[in-house]
Amino acid sequence: MVELSTGLSAAALDAIADLERRVVDADGGRLKLEWETLRHRSGDDAEDVLWWDGDRLLGFLGIYAHGAPTLELAGMVDPAARKRGIGTALLDAAQGLCREREHDAVLLVVPRPSAAGRSLALRRGGRLEHSEHALELHGEPASVPAKADIAVRAATPADQQALREILRLAFDWEPPSTATHDPNALVVEQDGRPIGTARLYVEGDRAGIYGFAIHPGQQGRGIGRDVLHRMCRTARAAGATTVHLEVATDNDRALNLYTSLGFEPVITEDYYALPD
Ligand SMILES: CC(C)(COP(=O)(O)OP(=O)(O)OC[C@H]1O[C@@H](n2cnc3c(N)ncnc32)[C@H](O)[C@@H]1OP(=O)(O)O)[C@@H](O)C(=O)NCCC(=O)NCCS
């Protein structure tokens, strides 16, 4: 019944999308499945656990590394197949895969409305590590005066060191030294000097913004607002009707910025650190 999947076939991706629809129809909100990641699995390692009943997918749990030593687990069980131990079996299998990989922590992502998810995390000895709001913008962002000295361009491998330093200072966090150049990374420049970064992904009618940071010395001057507005316009021009991002629940400053541009909360997600 449990399949440890190395890469995901088109049929498996379709089955996961169908299962996601059934779960969201029943539970509302959204699931943190990160389709961009699922569609581009390298196929080098087993990173997804699927529970099949014949050719019907009843459960899924993906392992997400984001180039960092912290592994995240996110998934779902068919509403009609709950309380049969499928979630526990998926988690057992996924934790087994995590143990074979280098990691510093494993976090289970639980949508806050999911009482079953929370109880599974707690039964496994999970400890609430942090929480994030998922937000979405549908339509045009609120207008913002453009700053003439600010430019946003695609990052090159030569920018990597400067961007790591901005991320380190802005998030008070050491970015992994093994991270490779991301073609979706952007550089924010002021008079040609890098002062900020973000990653913008556009896939079909959806876009996502990640790792958005302005150098602490330049924060609070309206640059973040201008850059966010530009990224939303770029995403819309590329065909996205929805722009998605996530923000820690205690980051009031960023949350206010996003909602004032028109982003609306979709769901709150709790990240539980699981014991090894
Ligand atoms: C969030 C961030 C990208 C915004 O960039 P920024 O250039 O500081 O943003 P702005 O100057 O356009 O300010 C946007 C809002 O943030 C608030 N803000 C920014 N700096 C502030 C400061 N020093 N003190 C208080 N509020 C501040 C303001 O409320 C402002 O809203 P306003 O225009 O109504 O006054 C930036 O502050 C940052 O890098 N923070 C650390 C990393 C982070 O939290 N990233 C977001 C992760 S989701």
Image (tube, rainbow, N blue to C red):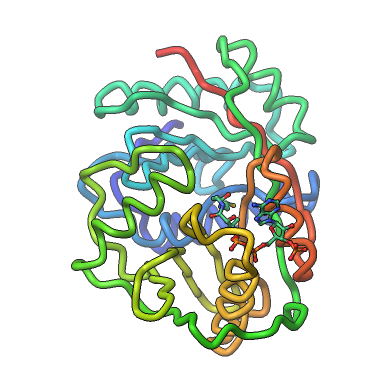
Image x and y of residue 209, in percent: 54, 63
**Depth check, front residue: 138 or 233:** 233
- In the image, residue 164 lies at what x, y percent? 32, 52
Compared with 196, 233 (above or below) is below
205 or 87: which is nearer to us?
205
Where on the picture, by quarter, is residue 233?
A: bottom right
Q: Is residue 229 left or right of residue 104?
A: right
Classify residue 146 by image quadrant.
bottom right
Q: Count of labels shown?
A: 0
Q: Residue 223: x and y, percent?
A: 58, 70
Q: Residue at x 38, y 47 (%)?
A: 66
Residue at point 58%, 83% (across, down)? 147
252 sits to left or right of 194: right
Residue displayed at 57% across by 16% down: 126
- Taking the image in four quarters, ligand 1 sits in the one at bottom right
Asked if 115 appears above or below 256 in the picture, the reply is: above
